Image (cartoon, helix red, strand yellow):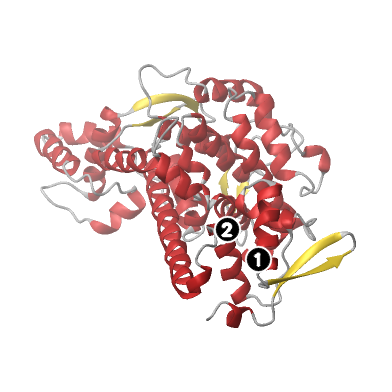
């Protein structure tokens, strides 16, 4: 990925415009650009889209825009390696995205009971999707079907890549417990230990902050170009304490929207890169912790990594745009707000599609339409995978139900002749009946 061109410093350009008598034109251009909330361009993009106009060069036009942004921005407790604060402000586009997120996430301990009931049926698929795609972002090569069967059957991972997926899944389940606790450096280490267990070259680095001996930097895999050099390891203890204060709603004057806080927490971990490896997975996990802690319960079901994986360069570029343009967090914030909104949209479309498929199957089943949604999901899978194997534990994991309920589901299908029971070792295993489609009248 090409490193973005660093923008020209805007203050000297403003001084020059004043000296040349362009102050009024300069300020007018700044105001007009502020009325275009649909775009928030970095210099690397802006310079290709404009030409000299109103007597202002490209650089002077940029300076006018950058001045307006700086005047609106507020600092946060995160500072770069030179001690300069990161800043942001909420533009109209951000307010619109935040409204969509608040509207659809059912914020609050109760939320929408109907939506919760409908969504909870898809918890396994949702957690599995985030676990898989977050691992794929870090280079794991695992298919969706492999990940699903491994987690559903609680099979031991057969490779480091599969272990990454299983670790992420277990961590996502753990976050439901951790959301009740304030963030501490010890909790950050716990999350890192969970996501990296058995996947690092040096197991001693699991759940430990990097040291001065660890030469950590972010590089391009192909060219070796250095994108980011994190703060010195000797500063990590204080920086992590400051991060925890921020995450626990300390250190910022006035109200900060919880979603913005969660996004900044994501960025902060990635910027400080406190670990030898596993920083991205830890950062995304702590984003979810923050969302869940603030009652954004739907966050347990949507997958930001699924959306990021569609265009990973945009994700990494959002980090670089922030770092190269005076620590302006708006680039990363806007990118992540759009990712969250897209994630919610993908989740809801997935739910609608599964409901359509289930309803179609119910209509075709006729007399068998009294099957519950878990049984219908199993039958739908069995029709597509005639050689699949099912267990009570796997069915229980897939649907987040009790062992007895899962057993009742499967034995009822066996009693109807739709599943046949076999045995592997001491465990009962169920397979689709050879004439399953015919028995269902399909």
Frontmost of labels 2 and 1 is 1
Contact between marks 2 and 1 (CB within 8 A): the answer is: no
Q: Residue at x 53, y 69 (%)?
A: 368
Residue 180 in view (yes/no): yes
Question: Left or right: where does residue 256 sit relative to residue 66?
Answer: right
Q: Going by the image, does 70 lie left or right of 414?
A: left
Q: Specify few, some or many for label 2: CA neighbours under 10 Å numbering under 14, 14-19, or 20 or more.
A: some
Q: Earlier in the sequence, mark 2 or mark 1?
A: 2
Is residue 147 visible in this depiction of the protein? no
In the image, 64 versus 392, the foreground residue is 392
User: Depth check: 40 or 387 in front?
Assistant: 387
Q: Residues within 10 Å of mark 1 (few under 14, many from 20)?
A: some
Q: Residue at x 14, y 35 (%)?
A: 27
Which element carries disc 1, helix, strand or loop? helix
For mark 1, what is the residue?
A: 413
Q: Is residue 126 above or below residue 17?
A: below
Spatial separation of the CA atoms under disc 2 and disc 1: 11 Å
Query: On the image, numbered disc 2 is attached to which residue?
Result: 374
Q: Nearer the viewer, residue 235 or 189?
A: 189
Q: Residue 241: which disc?
A: none
The residue located at (69%, 38%) in the rendering is 192
Q: Is residue 54 above or below residue 182?
A: below
Q: Where is residue 10? Give x, y as percent.
A: 29, 36
């Amino acid at each position: 990925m090409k490193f973005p061109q660093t923008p020209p410093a805007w203050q000297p350009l403003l001084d020059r415009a004043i000296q040349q008598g362009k102050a009024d034109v300069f300020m007018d251009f700044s105001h007009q650009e502020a009325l275009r909330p649909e775009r928030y361009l970095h210099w690397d993009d802006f310079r290709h889209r404009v030409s000299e106009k109103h007597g202002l060069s490209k650089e002077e036009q940029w300076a006018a825009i950058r001045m307006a942004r700086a005047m609106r921005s507020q600092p946060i407790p995160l500072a770069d390696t030179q001690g300069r604060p990161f800043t942001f402000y909420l533009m109209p586009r951000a307010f619109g995205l935040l409204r969509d997120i608040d509207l659809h996430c059912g914020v609050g301990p109760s939320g929408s009971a109907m939506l919760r009931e409908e969504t909870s049926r898809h918890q396994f698929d949702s957690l599995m999707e985030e676990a898989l795609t977050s691992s794929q972002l870090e280079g794991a090569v695992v298919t969706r079907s492999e990940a699903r069967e491994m987690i559903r059957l609680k099979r031991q991972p057969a490779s480091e890549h599969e272990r990454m997926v299983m670790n992420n899944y277990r961590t996502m389940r753990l976050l439901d417990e951790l959301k009740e606790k304030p963030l501490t450096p010890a909790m950050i280490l716990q999350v890192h230990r969970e996501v990296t267990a058995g996947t690092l070259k040096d197991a001693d680095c699991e759940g430990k902050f990097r040291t001065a001996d660890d030469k950590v930097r972010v590089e391009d895999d192909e060219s070796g170009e250095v994108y980011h050099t994190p703060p010195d390891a000797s500063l990590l203890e204080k920086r992590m304490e400051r991060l925890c204060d921020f995450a626990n709603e300390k250190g910022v004057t006035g109200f900060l929207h919880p979603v913005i806080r969660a996004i900044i927490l994501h960025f902060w971990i990635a910027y400080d890169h406190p670990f030898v490896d596993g920083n991205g997975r830890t950062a995304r996990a702590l984003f979810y912790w923050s969302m869940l802690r603030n009652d954004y319960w739907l966050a347990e079901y949507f997958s930001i990594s699924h959306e990021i994986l569609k265009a990973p360069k945009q994700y990494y570029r959002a980090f670089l745009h922030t770092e190269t343009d005076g620590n302006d967090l708006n680039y990363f914030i806007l990118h992540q707000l759009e990712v969250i909104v897209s994630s919610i949209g993908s989740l809801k479309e997935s739910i609608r599609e599964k409901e359509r498929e289930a309803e179609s199957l119910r209509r075709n089943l006729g007399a068998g339409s009294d099957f519950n949604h878990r049984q219908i999901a199993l039958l739908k899978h069995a029709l597509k995978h005639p050689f699949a194997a099912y267990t009570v534990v796997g069915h229980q994991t897939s649907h987040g139900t009790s062992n007895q309920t899962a057993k009742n589901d499967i034995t009822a299908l066996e009693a109807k002749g739709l599943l046949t029971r076999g045995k592997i070792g001491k465990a009962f295993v169920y397979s689709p009946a050879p004439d399953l489609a015919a028995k269902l009248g399909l």
